[in-house]
Image (cartoon, rainbow, N blue to C red):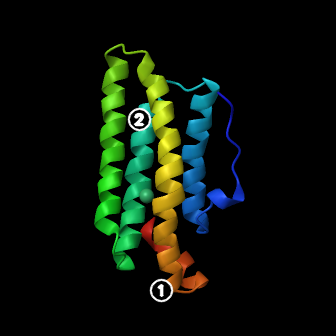
Amino acid sequence: MDQLIWKSNFSIGIDEIDQQHKTLFMYLNKGMAGVIDPDGIFDNLKAYAGLHFSGEEKLMRKIGYPGLEGHQHQHRLFVERVEQLERAVIGGEKQAVSQLVSFLRDWFLEHILTEDKNYANYMRTKMNEDDIIFLVAYSYE
Ligand SMILES: [Fe+2]
């Protein structure tokens, strides 16, 4: 599969979060290139999700984002799906790695480019750029 190139419109406009999204993008590209390590990827993804999602949720709570519950639900589904695919790989289901790659691709396109942009836009209606930077740093400390 072809590699994806990061485009400026993939950014949600909050640097710290964009950097984290680029980490996921890197895993996705490794998967697309067929160089994903099936033994390490699941631990990496679970660690990524633990840190990244809890920070996002903390942030959404602080700004009183009305879509928090639905967004949290999507985060839970991500973790469940990753765990399910991990069990499949352990069980010897070889196609589970390519299912993981498709899942990450869909997640990137549907969750990050839609849902994450929504809360970032909401945030910008509530506070200025400096306050956003401060709040994001605080949410990930
Ligand atoms: Fe998110």
The residue singled out by tag 1 in the image is: 126
- Report how far apart the C-alphas of labels 2 and 1 lie in the structure: 36 Å
From the viewer's perspective, is residue 31 above or below residue 61? above
From the viewer's perspective, is residue 4 above or below residue 75? above
- Relative placement, left or right, of 50 versus 32 is left
Tag 1's secondary structure?
helix
Mark 1 and ligand 1: say if the CB distance to the nearest ligand atom is below 8 Å: no
Q: Which residue shows up at 37% across the image and 78% down it?
A: 62
Q: What residue type is labelled 2?
A: Asp
The residue singled out by tag 2 in the image is: 43
- Relative placement, left or right, of 135 versus 10 is left
Q: Which residue shows up at 35% across the image and 79% down it?
A: 64
CB of mark 2 within 8 Å of CB of mark 1?
A: no
Q: What residue type is labelled 1?
A: Lys
Q: In which quarter of the image is ligand 1?
A: bottom left
Q: Can residue 137 be seen in this view?
A: no
Quarter of the picture containing the N terminus is top right
